[in-house]
Image: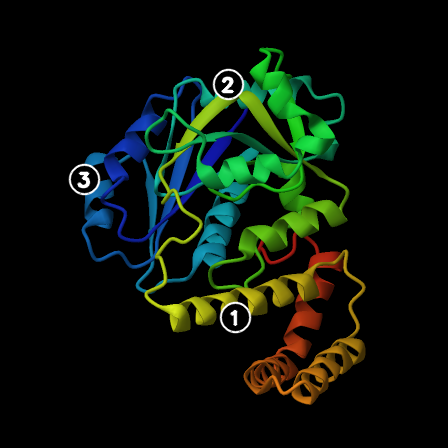
Amino acid sequence: MSDIHVIIVTYNAMKWAERCFTSLRHSSVPLQCTVIDNGSTDGTREYITKYFPEIDLIQSSENLGFGKANNLGIEKAYKEGADFFYLMNQDAWIFPDSFQHILDVYNNAPDKNKIGILSPMHLDGSEKKFDIHFENYLAKDVRNNRMFSDVYFGDAKPFYEISFVNAAHWFIPKNTIEKVGGFNPYFFYGAEDYEYVNRISYFGLKIMVCTKSKVVHDAVQSFHKNPPKDKAELLANTRLSMRMQRETKYLDPNYDYNVKREKTAILSYILKLSAKGNINESKFYLEQYKYFSKKFKEIEAARRTSMTGKHPFLNL
């Protein structure tokens, strides 16, 4: 029987705790669950200890961030002999047959060593629609896999290959952990899954969604978790996103990264903006240049680890 370890990082999760953990109890496939609590103050830890004693709880006095906390759970599960690692958000729950359908896809795969991540179909909290973010990820690949047409005409395949799915529900085989490793600790929160998926691609592995398996991700159904209060906040959020996208690109082992070229490119852009009289934008990119000048060595080290390390970013 497959040994599946569910890993959940919590931070003030009382809104979803009962539904999340109760759903695991009702799984038709036996599971083990480890929760890494990032210093909750709303009673999450006490609730889990009292009502879900079967869960292994790792308590942190501080917020470790998404990636680092998940890595602790992955390390624990690996050392306990896990065959599969299921990363699941705190604002999520499963159905009794969710794991069985995923296992069916895995067990029938012609080349299991090529599977990087298996994902179920993410519903929103109403359980009547796809999660809006998940639907957006699927849409980016419809030209290649024609999934929407197949589903509409009742001829859906058991799985479809896609280029990205967020880490709210990731079913990861042991082979992936040994080859790709854990989350890159460079990020505290916000781009860990994108960076990980880039490494999945680098090692020639695939991401697949399993059409018969459904789960719930009760996320905010908007592309802005917290709508900006004004134009200034919108601009700040946009610039933060731009910086993180640049960091993700630099860390991507598929990207032909060269520090000298990157520095030259940013400086050249600053000069062009200044020449056009766009002072505010040129100041922003100057700040970016200063920021990355302090980060390039760290990025280079992380790239080397992700490309050549043994089970990168994990202590196994």
At label 2, which amino acid type do we have?
Answer: Gln
Query: Which residue is tagged 1?
Result: 239
Q: Earlier in the sequence, mark 3 or mark 2?
A: 3
Cβ atoms at labels 3 and 1 below 8 Å apart? no
Query: Which residue is tagged 3?
Result: 50
Within 10 Å of the Cα at label 3, are there few (<14), some (14-19), or many (20+) other Cα atoms? few
Query: Which residue is tagged 2?
Result: 100
Vertical comparison of 84 with 295: above or below: above
Q: Kindly identify the residue that appears in the image at 27 percent across and 39 percent down.
A: 16
Q: Kindly identify the residue that appears in the image at 48 percent across and 41 percent down.
A: 133
At label 1, which amino acid type do we have?
Answer: Arg
The N terminus lies in which quarter of the figure?
top right
Looking at the picture, how far across and down is residue 282, in whole percent? 61, 84
Q: Is residue 173 visible?
A: no
Q: Kindly identify the residue that appears in the image at 74 percent across and 34 percent down.
A: 114
Q: Is residue 43 visible?
A: yes
Helix or strand or loop: what does disc 2 sit on? helix
Of the residues tagged 2 and 1, which is closer to the observer? 1
Of the residues tagged 3 and 2, which is closer to the observer? 2
Of the residues tagged 3 and 1, which is closer to the observer? 1
Within 10 Å of the Cα at label 1, are there few (<14), some (14-19), or many (20+) other Cα atoms? some
Nearer to us in this view, 186 or 174: 186
Q: CA distance from mark 3 to mark 1?
A: 43 Å
Helix or strand or loop: what does disc 1 sit on? helix
Q: Quadrant of residue 246?
A: bottom right
At label 3, which amino acid type do we have?
Answer: Lys
Q: CA distance from mark 2 to mark 1?
A: 42 Å
Can you tell which mark lies on residue 193?
Answer: none
Within 10 Å of the Cα at label 2, are there few (<14), some (14-19), or many (20+) other Cα atoms? some
Q: CA distance from mark 3 to mark 2?
A: 29 Å
